[in-house]
Image: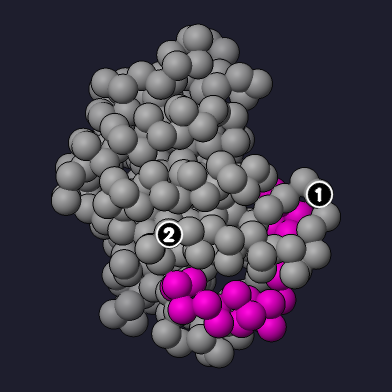
Amino acid sequence: MNGLYTALMCSFDEKGNVNEKGLREIVRHNIDVQQVDGLYVNGSTGENFLISKEQKKQIFDVVNNEAGNDVKLIAQVGALDLDEAVELATYATDLGYNAISAVTPFYYKFDFEEIKDYYNTILDSVDNDLIIYSIPALTGVNMNLEQFGELFKNEKVIGVKFTAPDFFLLERIRHAYPNKLIFSGFDEMLLSASVLNVDGAIGSTFNVNGRRAKQIYELAQKGQIDEARDVQKVTNDLIAEILDNGLYPTIKEILKYKGVDAGVCRKPMKSLDPEGVTNAQHIADKHL
Ligand SMILES: CC(=O)N[C@@H]([C@@H](O)[C@H](O)[C@H](O)CO)[C@@H](O)CC(=O)C(=O)O
């Protein structure tokens, strides 16, 4: 399962429906042009927390059908409705997804026993491996080394998508659990995470900048740190401007500019105004 996974965007039309043709184009662009090793489906970048259970299943279907066996597929199934998480985990597993992933339960202040029960409930119901999706900045859930260790005791928990700027904790997890997979979640910090020997990365900007991300990761693995730093610098020039203009709408606009029918974002996320669209096109001309 090692490697670089795009946190896949989804194409929606103005009414919020999944645009299947556009989604297929995004999948193909990531596989054929960005040449990533896998796709992380229905994560934050896929606007997962803005869509219905039926749409999540539809997206799992379309991506699986378009990608076939070309790349590895991870299905993010985490949901506050645990029954829904179990249903989605079963659904994606039956489709043949290589692994599932689940965001830590959020909004209510769940204690660690509740978080552990959430993961074990999902895992008891499916014959598949799971990658914890930890993103404290969005969920407010901060787990420490011992708590990751508790979750890792379940052999079906094969790793973590670590989206936090905490390199002390990342190093401690790497050292303590050499056999678990760690995927770096912040694209702008990929080199720093790669130096700590992560097993791969999952990122939103890989939808448009996957080839450079792969270069950073591979150069770091070969110990060519100066070269990797140069590519991270160019990458961060791009990411800084994307973040400034609005993360997901700008990535969608860049995809559209490159001929990929990426659609618009689901409300309440807003789409770009005409100035934002022009900015996105300038960003693409300048950096891609
Ligand atoms: C909140 C968010 O979108 N985080 C991204 C990053 O790729 C992030 O967009 C990027 O590093 C820019 O900050 C990923 O960690 C998210 C992700 O993998 C997902 O879509 O689930």
Occupied quadrant, residue 10: top left
Q: Residue at x 68, y 77 (%)?
A: 147
Label 1 SS: loop
Q: Is 153 colored magenta in this rendering?
A: yes
- The answer to whether residue 266 is left or right of residue 200 is right
**Image quarter hosting the C terminus:** top left
**Image position, residue 255 (x, y; %):** 35, 28
Write the residue at 38% across / 63% down: 128
Q: Nearer the viewer, residue 201 or 226?
A: 201
User: Along the horizontal axis of the image, is 134 left or right of 76?
Assistant: right
Q: Is mark 1 within 8 Å of ligand 1?
A: no
Q: Is residue 211 visible?
A: no
Residue 150: quarter of image: bottom right
Q: How many marks?
A: 2
Q: Does the rendering let one see residue 160? A: yes
Is 244 magenta? The answer is: no
- Where in the figure is residue 172, as x and y percent of width and height? 61, 85
- Mark 1 vs mark 2: which is more N-terminal? 1
Disc 2: which residue: 126
- Front residue of this view, candidates 214 and 126: 126
Nearest the eye: 135 or 281: 135
Residue 108: mark in rendering = 1
Q: Is residue 176 above or below residue 32?
A: below
Its colouring scheme is: one colour
Image location (x, y in percent) of residue 246: 58, 31
- Which quadrant holds the N terminus? bottom left
**Residues rendered magenta in the picture:** 136-158
